Image: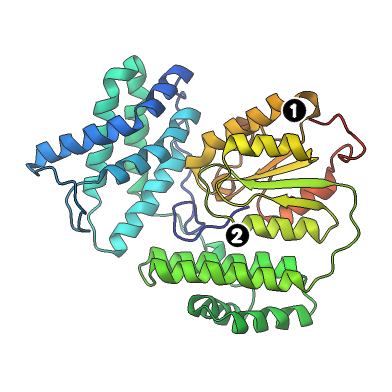
Amino acid sequence: MTLNTTHPAAATQAPLAPLASLAPLSAQALQTVQSLREQVAVQARLRLQHAQGTPPDPGPRTPQAPISSEAELRQQLEFLIPSLATGNSRPFANYLRWLRSVRQARRLAFEPLNDGLLCMAECLAPHLGPEKNTLDQLLQDSIRASEEAAPARRCEAEDRGFAIQPRFEEALLQGDRAAALALMAELETEGLALLEIEVHLIARSLQQIGLRWQRNEISVAQEHLATATASTVMADRFAHHPLPPLNGQRALLACVQGNRHSVGLSMVSDALELAGWEVQCLGADTPTPDLVAQVLAWRPGLVALSLAFSSHLLEAREAIAQIRSACGRAAPRIVVGGEALNQEPAWVDFLGADGYARDALGVLREAQARPPEASPAANPQAC
């Protein structure tokens, strides 16, 4: 459901083939890893400095620094933890493969990242007992798989669905709202619906722009400008479409805590509102307690949650558990989406969600095929 253009969850490469299944960490061991994230990153950084004879330097590091920063080590742990929780090493291997491609495009060595991962595993080992074997095996599998050549598969982002896509991408990169709006209007004149344009033109353009950032062809500033411009032109075109009468159904949309990528969620909002739904879109990085409180206060029949990266998996699972606990038998139907799930649809069961949608069109189909049993107005006891 969300779109992201400069991060590992972006659909910029074919996912790896299934790797050997591992037993997930126990709940106690997983909680230990989560509680030690900050401490382990600091310890690993100090060990790496000692091993390489590098004096501690709290100041800014240059891109050529030979060892990983604490921030980099923490991020790697954030992506490692969901694989430990599920016993599935493939998402972490995909993350490492993406990271390798980013560093290669910038002529940065990858070996220091492997060293950092193995050092963090050493720091965690005394706290995991026999379950450290699971951690060791997962890291070995992921590092080995990330070094393999990517499977040959044309990326969806490179499957340009409209001939105007190159011009549209350039308009986004230049921040040229007028040109982007003119191209969208051209497609609408040809009979395409706004949602089709959002999913098949804007989404693919942003994915292609993400590929260009990954290949070091554009800067972060240019990528941010493109994303901001896309959000602006979507809002502009949506404002030109009259809304149909309300159908009595309510949907609440949110990016889970930690997910700051909300363009796709805006597409979902547009899709449902143009279908007659009453929608509240909470946007990016919604704190879980506030999400639950809003569900209780507004009583939607449908909740759609977006998680862009595998690192958002446990936050999403916790949010769903809290919504169900707070609402009991009157809990809304919960649908999840995002690139993390597009790569691992089986995670829907792990999350405890009712359904999964690949994009805004999928959410609309899901909502229409299985609408909530009763509208909030007709069910005053909901939540």
Mark closest to the chain's N terminus, 1 or 2: 2
Out of 51 and 283, give the one closest to the viewer: 283
Query: Total number of numbered labels?
Result: 2
| Residue 80: image location, x then y, percent | 40, 36
Q: Which three-letter amino acid code belongs to the residue tagged 2?
A: Val
Q: Residues within 10 Å of mark 1 (few under 14, many from 20)?
A: some
Give residue 269's position: percent from left, percent from top. 72, 56
Q: Is residue 220 left or right of residue 323?
A: left
- Who's the residue at 83% across and 31% down the image? 382
Give whichever of 210, 220 is nearer the camera. Answer: 220
Answer left or right for 277 relative to 70.
right
Residue 159 visible in the picture:
no
Tell me what residue is drawn at x 46 percent, y 23 percent.
23
Residue 253, image x, y percentages = 69, 48
The Cα–Cα distance between marks 1 and 2, rounded to whole angstroms, is: 28 Å
Residue 262 in picture, x, y percent from top left:
59, 55
In what element is the residue under mark 2? Answer: helix
Quadrant in the rendering for residue 140: top left
- Which residue carries the number 2 mark? 263
Quadrant where the C terminus lies?
Answer: top right
Q: Identify the mark at residue 327; answer none if there is no mark.
A: 1
147 over 219 or under it: above or below:
above
Please name which of the two marks, 1 or 2, marks the residue nearer to the observer: 1
Disc sitting over residue 50 in the figure: none
